[in-house]
Image: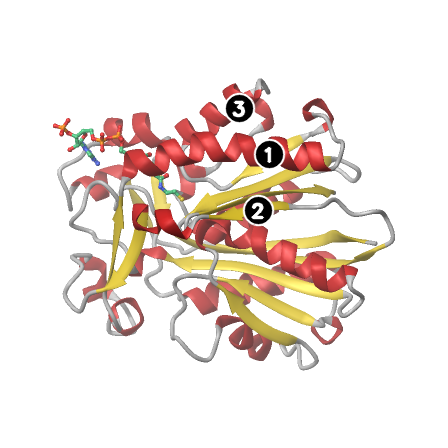
Amino acid sequence: MSARFCGTGSCVPDYVMDNDGVAELVETSDSWIRERTGIARRHIAVKETTVSMANEAAKRALDNAGVLPEELDLILMSTISSDVIIPCGACEVQKAIGADKAVCFDLNGACTGFVLAYNTALAYIESGIYQTVLIVGSESLSRLTNWKDRGTCILFGDGAGAAVIKKDERASYIPAAHSDGTRGEALLCHSKREENGLPLQKNDENGGKHLNSEDYLMQMDGQGVFRFAIKQVPEVIQEVLKKNGVKPEEIDWYILHQANRRILEAVAKRMGEPVEKFPMNMEEYGNTSSASIPILLDEMNRDGRLKRGQKIVLAGFGAGLTWGATIIEW
Ligand code: COA
């Protein structure tokens, strides 16, 4: 037994901050950011929140799947930037869409979160416990970003993506995932009750409350994370392919967490696979953590690039450290 993606949805904030906008906050430039990361713009939640974007992405995914909210058995939300600590984002989505039968909880897997949420949904479906699951990745990383640190604030953006997954009779693929808590300091975010320097807070219709209810500051060993990603991601993809007896050339798309163009290009090169099989949209959205894979899936689903029967690798990597890959058949 397996699980099939039967609908996707996404939602990104209206406000767009390009690299020149970031250069007004810290000493950097459009050309430096583009060259090192492939990012040109990011969408920043001003009137939106992590929950409001999740709600919208969820509604669009249900509509795309032709599934009613009351058919959902489980809602899993991956987020590291929920509006409030409790109730969880998944319960907020349940309330907004009226999925009264669903069990709801959140999962903190950072940039690997959507892949881990999919693996969790798959395990529930394979065990026969649930049949129809909504998985959501939603983030407002602009709330966590230190807008005075040019080493990190250039990277992140806000947005949400969602997918409806249903029980399917085909055989499933076994996922591969790993964690190494001993390397957690490479990318961490701790609370710090002081201004984080983002002037948008002052214009926020909600009086800045959801953006700055607590201040959390992101810290990252950029080169360490880069080295981690270009080593572990190709390895975990090779692992998942080997585990399932699938050859790289059988894969139509490698849909990776959209952290950085140079990371994805390095992964493609190490795997000896054409970079065209690694679609990218970080130019428009930056790194949206657990939302990046479902936003890209939704774009590709809606523009017709994804076709039934295609084999796709989903791979995430990030804080924890965590990394994982899974194969899906569209
Ligand atoms: N604009 C201009 N200069 C910058 C800058 C910026 N935004 N950020 C750093 N610099 C400077 C540094 O101060 C340094 O200057 P120096 O040589 O005078 O000391 C120089 O650029 C090189 O800094 P370094 O940190 O070595 O840059 P880098 O080539 O490693 O690029 C990242 C920085 C963050 C783009 C890169 O390390 C990276 O992509 N890492 C992975 C991050 C990631 O994807 N994290 C999320 C994973 S889920």
Location of the C terminus (image quadrant): top right
* Rendered residue at 64%/32% (across/down): 253
Residue 156 lies left or right of residue 123; in this view the side is: left
Label 3 element class: helix
Q: Which mark is residue 268?
A: 3
Q: Which mark is residue 177?
A: 2
Q: Earlier in the sequence, mark 2 or mark 1?
A: 2
Task: Give the quarter of the image for residue 208.
Answer: bottom left
Q: Does any atom of ligand 1 lie closer than 8 Å to the CB of label 1?
A: no
Residue 206 spot, x, y in % from top left: 29, 74
Location of the N terminus (image quadrant): bottom right
Q: For label 1, count other residues whose C-alpha is less than 10 Å away and answer few (under 14), some (14-19) or many (20+).
A: many
Mark 3 and mark 2: Cα distance apart in space = 19 Å
Residue 184 lies left or right of residue 212; in this view the side is: right
Label 2 element class: strand
Question: On the rendering, which quadrant does ligand 1 occupy?
Answer: top left
Q: Which mark is residue 200?
A: none
Q: Tell me which amino acid carries mark 3.
A: Ala
Q: Earlier in the sequence, mark 1 or mark 3?
A: 1
Mark 2 and mark 1: Cα distance apart in space = 10 Å
Q: Which mark is residue 237?
A: 1
Residue 179 spot, x, y in % from top left: 48, 49
Task: Give the quarter of the image for residue 97.
Answer: bottom right
Report the front residue among 260 and 238: 238
Task: Give the quarter of the image for residue 12.
Answer: bottom left
Mark 1 and mark 3: Cα distance apart in space = 11 Å
* Rendered residue at 34%/54% (across/down): 44
Q: For label 2, count other residues whose C-alpha is less than 10 Å away and answer few (under 14), some (14-19) or many (20+).
A: many
